Image: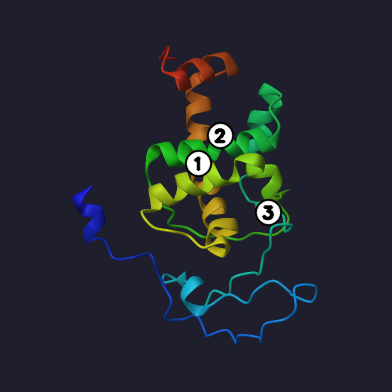
Amino acid sequence: MDDDAAREPLLDDRSVPAAPVAPAAAPAEAASPAPLAESAPAQTADESFEEPVFDEETALDFADDEIFEEIGKSTSLKPYTLVKHAIAWSLRDGGKATKFNYVNGGLELNRQTITGEYDAYFKALIEQVEGRHLTEEEYFPKYVKSHIDRGAEILSSHYRHAGNLDKYVLETLGVGDTV
């Protein structure tokens, strides 16, 4: 844990231009607020990367849809269920989000489908693992997507190790080992 404190931050706001702030509008005319430079950090690994603009209704594309499709075929679990498992595995593993990849043409799920009525819990858990407060713009889609991508690999490994849904559930609960 002491090593985490010594690590350099993954994100900074050096490459994010300051967004102009529009004058306040009447509530009926109000549009979504413009993000502030301090609340929209960019990746340090590839500072030329331009992040797509998302809102709560925007669907996320997942390159990991092959993992969800493969497991879904043998278990009859839907992608929205498997995505929650992926987030859980990523958070349980305790690793911080390190990759922020955006793809087009993969599995599409929106925020409501992914987190639903438990959105505040998902955000709190992700903030706990990340060790800091996340703005709404950071939380979804950036960090949610990163934990789904990370967790999909872990989910796939656990499911392959188990071999079937029953053994996967028992292993996940810590009741049995599939070896």
1 or 3: tag closer to the N-terminus: 3
Q: Is residue 116 visible?
A: yes
Residue 67 quadrant = top right
Q: Is residue 67 visible?
A: no
2 or 1: tag closer to the N-terminus: 2
Residue found 41% across the figure and 36% down from its top:
92
Residue found 71% across the figure and 27% down from its top:
73
Amino acid type at circle 3 is: Asp
Query: Dot 1: what SS?
Result: helix
Amino acid type at circle 1 is: Gly
Tag 2 near tag 1, CB within 8 Å:
yes
For residue 128, side relative to residue 8 (left or right): right
Residue found 61% across the figure and 39% down from its top:
83
Query: Dot 3: what SS?
Result: strand
Residue 61 is situated, as x and y percent measured from the top left of the image, at: 68, 54
Q: Nearer the viewer, mark 3 or mark 2?
A: 2
Q: Name the foreground residue: 10 vs 126.
A: 126
* Above/below status of 131 relative to 81: below
Cα separation, mark 2 vs mark 1, equals: 8 Å
Packing grade of label 3 (10 A; few <14, some 14-19, many >=20) is some
Which residue matches tag 3?
61
Q: Which mark is residue 85?
A: 2
Which residue matches tag 1?
151
